[in-house]
Image (cartoon, grey):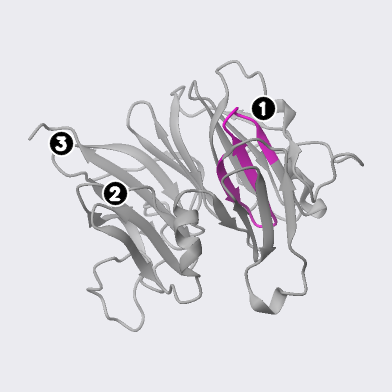
Amino acid sequence: MELLAAGFNAWLQLQFDDGNTSDEPDDITSFQVVLREEYIGRPSSLLPCTFVKSASGIKQAGFVNDVPENIKDKFLSSSAAIAGNGIIAEYDGRDTVYQYPFWPVMQTQKREEFSKMGEITQLVAYETGFVALSNEGNVWTWGDERYSACLGREITNSSPAEQPGLVEELQELPTGRIRKISAAGYVILALTEGHDLYAWGGHPGRPALLEDLSADPMPIVIEESDIVDCAAGESHLIVLTSDGDVYVIGSNTNGQLGLPVDEAKSWTKVPLNLGAGHVVFGVEAGQRTSFVLTKNQIPR
């Protein structure tokens, strides 16, 4: 397997080999292989660091000193996430999500507990809140009421913004239940079992990342292709189609699109220089980074 990466690299968070000792490392502006192993899991990327499970154990790159050891595995398993406002949500593996401040300076904020969402299979964060996916395909959101478009649901007295509420528009969809969620910045993505992609969110003071993006989950169409994987960054998105092609859209300030442009205002196919016999099977994103996972289809 190979892990390709592009984007923000100021803390060497895209380099696992410790080969670059430059005081001012460059961003990676086209997709490059950053790790080769017999097995590579999906990376988890915070702004200053990246973690990934591999055949030889957990690999880490960048500035990792501020990340507690006991939370790294939970980031990698999508059972914990940290929002841009410095709040962590962590699933206990049974029936409760705990929410608490990440930074000691925020310890005046109380720890909260949320339950009755079912078994959580994925927990992700955006700038001011969280999204959880249950094993039944239900999507739950909660966060800051000021950015209500990210909730994808109506705020009521019985379902306030700061407590998990069900995104009802994502139930009983034509192509099945939601099987993956991703979030960052002010955009949330949800992918169905039948390979349809939905998006919602937005910031009232910023240009929309996608045309017609709103508080209502809307289907995303890319070259009439099925979408088999997706990921959201702070101001960019990356998807994998059923044809094996990778498309990106959004800001390219740090090279996270892997393209020679400042910005992609429409979905743009990324040219990838894959190893012999390798095909793409997954994509992920950090705030200002993008990742492509490949595997070798040639029998040994």
Q: Amino acid under label 1?
A: Leu
Percent position of residue 148, x then y = 78, 46
Q: Amino acid under label 2?
A: Ile
Mark 3 and mark 2 lie on one chain; the one further toward the N terminus is 2
Residue that protrudes farthest toward the right in the picture: 157
Percent position of residue 207, x then y = 67, 51
Q: Say if 172 sits above or below 259 in the image.
A: above
| Total numbered labels placed on residues in the image | 3
Q: Amino acid under label 3?
A: Gly
Q: Does the magenta stretch include residue 125?
A: yes
Q: Which residue is the site of mark 1? A: 170
Assign the C terminus to one quadrant of the image.
top left
Numbered label attached to residue 56: none
Question: Measuring 24% from the left and 68% from the top, which residue is drawn there?
Answer: 17
Q: Do the residues labelled 3 and 2 touch (CB within 8 Å)?
A: no
Numbered label attached to residue 40: 2
| Helix, strand or loop at mark 2 | loop
